[in-house]
Image (cartoon, grey):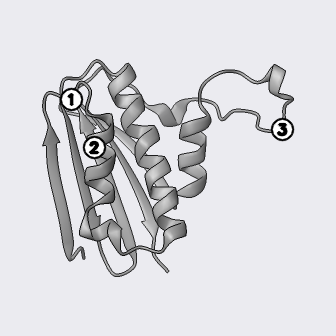
Amino acid sequence: MYFCSMERRFDPVEGKNAEIIETVMNCPEVVNLPEDVKFKVRLCVEEIEENILDYSGTTWVDVHVNAATDELKITFKDGGMEFDPLKRQDPDINAPLEQRQIGGLGIYLCKEMMDSVSYRYENGSNILTMVKKIK
């Protein structure tokens, strides 16, 4: 059961990258987290919202932050073209730099830093949810 929640729509979304990040990071649900968890949350929020704003073609983004005693859940919903970033093959992080493909590292980091990342396309909207367990 979630005991604290923030929901905000950004519309129009153009040029709102920093505002979205700061809105999430300034939520009471996030402010009091340990610094190492906040670092991971910020990096992942930045990666997801920049991918949405740069590639989806949406004009709006809804951001939901929910906190419980043992987890933080952040959900992004947008009206852009359907795209599941989790289906993209993970980059080979062991390959020499000159052989690595461009792209995909941010989503890979989100999958590694969060306890779960899920995607669904529902009623014309992309919905991506990240969950971080709080110890």
Q: In front: 32, or 53?
A: 32
Image point (39%, 72%), residue name: 71
Q: Quadrant of residue 16?
A: top left
Q: In this view, does 102 lie to the left or right of 28?
A: right
Image point (23%, 24%), residue name: 14
Tag 1, which secondary structure? loop
Up/down of 23 relative to 19, above or below: below
Residue that badge 2 annotates: 20
Q: Residue 94 carries which label?
A: 3
Image point (51%, 37%), residue name: 86
Camera-nearest label, 2 or 3: 2
Where residue 90 sits: x, y (%)? Answer: 65, 35
Q: Quadrant of residue 101?
A: top right
Q: Which of marks 3 and 1 is nearer the N terminus?
A: 1
Q: How far apart are marks 2 and 3 (CA)?
A: 32 Å
Give the residue type that dot 1 points to: Val
Give the residue type that dot 3 points to: Asn
Q: In front: 67, or 12?
A: 12
Q: Which of marks 2 and 1 is nearer the N terminus?
A: 1
Q: Residue 13 carries which label?
A: 1
